[in-house]
Image (tube, grey):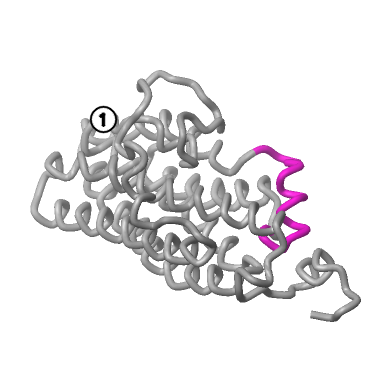
Amino acid sequence: MSETMPIEQYLQEGGMLSSPDNAPPRYRGELLRLMASFVDSELAGSAGFADIINDAPGIQERISAARIVLEKTDHAGQVLQVMETFGVDGGRYAIHHPWAARLSRDADIGAVRQGGDMRLAVFHYPLEGWVDAVVMNVLMGAASVVQLKELARVSYQPLAETFRAILPRERRHAELGAAGLVRIVTDDEGRAKARASAAYWYPRVAASFGHAGSPRFETLSRFGLRHTPNETLLAEWQTEVDAQLSALGLN
């Protein structure tokens, strides 16, 4: 970094930081918040999906569900290791919230986080059976891929490298969900259940992208922690999942 260049300019122009020692206080705070949101969402998501494994209709589906639970927990652990370099107590972190806790199915919280953790609001809603879990995984899996492609560009190099390593596995989770959904819609009953679940989860997953014109995006952009506006990421997700749902008759 140039001795005369302000750090925000350096980061906005593509500069990278590689150590907690180089991170100014405001940057550290925003970076830790970003990491906590990812870790908490992965832990909450895996905890919710773990409860549904025994609802899977066959051995292969159970294996796929168990794999998703395992790998999401591992992804949380990988990012938590980066947080530990900033002084976070990783040993206590994973047990300090009831990750499987959920609100009622008819709660309407928009994008507002609840309780004491930083999970995305969508992970406060409960799953209702196997079909519902698969639909949620398809929609949120596609959202995770879009969001991780953005996060893989963060200006803190160790975290960017971690997200780039996580992205292929999260993409595989979305593919497993899509394959499961194809099997579900082979009969009218399955298609009807899937359509109802899609109607439930679609707006809740969409809300996870945040508000258009968000002032917070501008703050993160100055630090090189975000690059693409919320509304652009949302539009990318909508294009992908609308095509998926349309092909299966689930719009």
The location of residue 194, given as percent across then percent down, is: 31, 35
Q: Nearer the viewer, residue 81 or 133?
A: 81
Numbered disc total = 1
Specify the quadrant that holds the C terminus. top left
**Left or right side of 156 for 70:** left
Secondary structure under the numbered disc 1 in the rendered image: loop
- Quadrant of the rendered image containing residue 76: bottom left
| Residue occupying the point 55% across, 46% down | 238
Q: Nearer the viewer, residue 238 or 243?
A: 238
**Left or right side of 213 for 97:** left
- Quadrant of the rendered image containing residue 126: top left
Q: Nearer the viewer, residue 88 or 8?
A: 88
| Residue occupying the point 19% across, 54% down | 66
The location of residue 2, given as percent across then percent down, is: 84, 81
Does 133 lie within the magenta span? no
Most extreme residue toward the right, as rendered? Answer: 4
The location of residue 67, given as percent across then percent down, is: 23, 59
Specify the quadrant that holds the N terminus. bottom right
| Residue occupying the point 55% across, 63% down | 149
In the displayed structure, 129 sits above or below 91; it is above
The location of residue 229, given as percent across then percent down, is: 70, 51
Q: Nearer the viewer, residue 199 or 40?
A: 40
Residue identified by numbered label 1? 128
Amino acid tagged 1: Glu
**Left or right side of 26 for 87:** left
Q: Which residues are magenta?
A: 211-226
